[in-house]
Amino acid sequence: MNDETTDQLAPDVPATSRGRSESVIRARLLQAIFERRLPPGEKLTEDRLAELFGVSRTVVRQALARLAQDGIVEQHPNRGAFVAAPSRADARHVLEARAVVEPEVAHALACRCGAEALARLRRHVARENAARAAGDRGTLVRLTGEFHVALAEEAGNPVFVRLLTELHALSSLAILLYARGEHAACPPSEHGDILGAIERGDAEEATRLMREHIAHVAAEMDLSEPEDRPTNLAQALGFTPRTRQRSR
């Protein structure tokens, strides 16, 4: 990882938080991925991370190992750790998982969402709208991803929270790789519509809107495999294969 990218991880970390545990490192790396400041394939150097967070390399190694278990970091022998670069197939699998889990989260929350939870989610959507209006792309991307995790938190299922944290980090990486045009975040107004259905207690509508929302996110990515993939290096580089002559 270059110093310019790595140095972006540190400023928002309170000095009192540094060195407490590997969870701080995981959280900051995830935030950088959500905001797309750490791109797919970026190298994560243990020494540099240990210096930035004021911890030992052992703590950094633990944080990277946990992220590797979740598929967010790839570890290669003799090369180190890298931010994952999901394939198109990986991205499709992530979206398929989201399409199963998130409508259920929206349904459950519509059935039992209290006033305090609704107020928190409304504030979150308001911050999304403010970031969109200000053109703050990094903050908007992070907030739109965190909205889906916040729904799981308010639904009260810690398993869904962990799963959606992983899925949305992988979604952010997939969008960086396969977005069509300038796709940056979830489509405008859809989070507000989902929250409106939850607030009305309309579980079926919340489920339908969430399912459509994930379909819209998927539609903004090119996840189709090329029909005519090169079969060898020469073909990939555009060389015309030459016919070998048989020796007499």
Image (cartoon, rainbow, N blue to C red):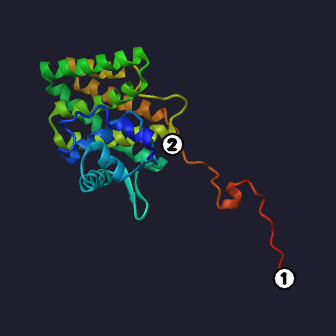
Closer to viewer: mark 2 or mark 1? 1
Q: Which residue is mark 2?
A: 223
Badge count:
2
Question: Can you give x and y, in whole percent of width and height, for residue 177 in the image?
Answer: 50, 41
Residue neighbourhood size for the residue with mark 1, other residues' Cα within 10 Å, grouped as few (<14), some (14–19), many (≥20): few
Q: Mark 1 or mark 2, which is nearer the start of the sequence?
A: 2
Q: Quadrant of residue 230?
A: bottom right
Give the Cα separation between the discs numbered 2 and 1. 46 Å
Q: Which residue is mark 1?
A: 247
Q: Quadrant of residue 236?
A: bottom right
Q: Residue at x 43, y 32 (%)?
A: 217
| Helix, strand or loop for disc 2 | loop
- Measured along the vertical axis of the image, is residue 181 above or below residue 159? above
Residue 170 showing in the rendered view: yes
Question: Can you give x and y, in whole percent of width and height, for residue 129 in the image?
Answer: 35, 16
**Residue type at numbered disc 1:** Ser
- Measured along the vertical axis of the image, is residue 220 above or below residue 198? below
Q: Residue at x 32, y 23 (%)?
A: 191
